[in-house]
Amino acid sequence: LGKALRLSGEIKLTMAAHESAAQDLAAALVLESPIKFPVLSLVYTGSRIGQADVLWSMCECELQKGNHSQAAKFVVDCLRMYEGERSVLGVAQAKHLAAQIKAMVGNVVGAFKDLNDCIHTYRDSNA
């Protein structure tokens, strides 16, 4: 269900239905997050990669709405999760998105640094 809600949110983003997309993405994030049912003594750890993917989509939603500061917060969390899971491709893509956000707000030096980090991450993974 979480993946379906993420896809629904992505489709709604392409149609500029930002509010509805944000609702679907928020629900997807909840479904991908770890939970514990104390009565059943059951722990569902969720999917960290799934959480990072949803945060990526939420970041894109905020960018489309012009909310660069919230998008930057989402991409930081997204990057942290990809790094924690050692997803080289995810880390590189998150760094690329971070560079785009910094360029949008006029932080050219920060964008250049993040883009260089992104390039090195891709190169190191393909070495």
Image (cartoon, rainbow, N blue to C red):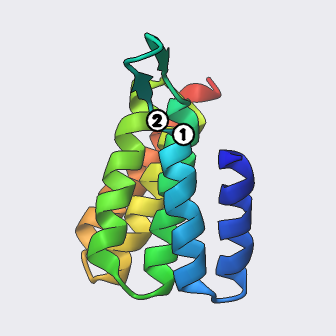
Which residue occupies the foreground of this view, 39 or 60? 39
Looking at the image, tell me whether mark 2 or mark 1 is earlier in sequence order.
1
Find residue 82 and name its label.
2
Label 2 – label 1 distance at C-alpha: 14 Å
| Residue 124, position as x, y percentages in the image | 53, 28
Task: Report the number of discs.
Answer: 2
Work out which quarter of the rendered image holds the C terminus and state it. top right
Q: Do callouts 2 and 1 mark residues in contact (Cβ within 8 Å)?
A: no
Q: Mark 1 is on which residue type?
A: Glu
Vertical position of residue 53 compared to residue 17: above or below: above
As helix, strand or loop, the secondary structure at mark 1 comes to: helix
Quick one: label 2, few (<14), some, or many (20+) residues within 10 Å? many
Find residue 32 and name its label.
1
Which residue occupies the foreground of this view, 104 or 3? 3
Q: Mark 2 is on which residue type?
A: Tyr
Residue 69 located left or right of residue 116 = left
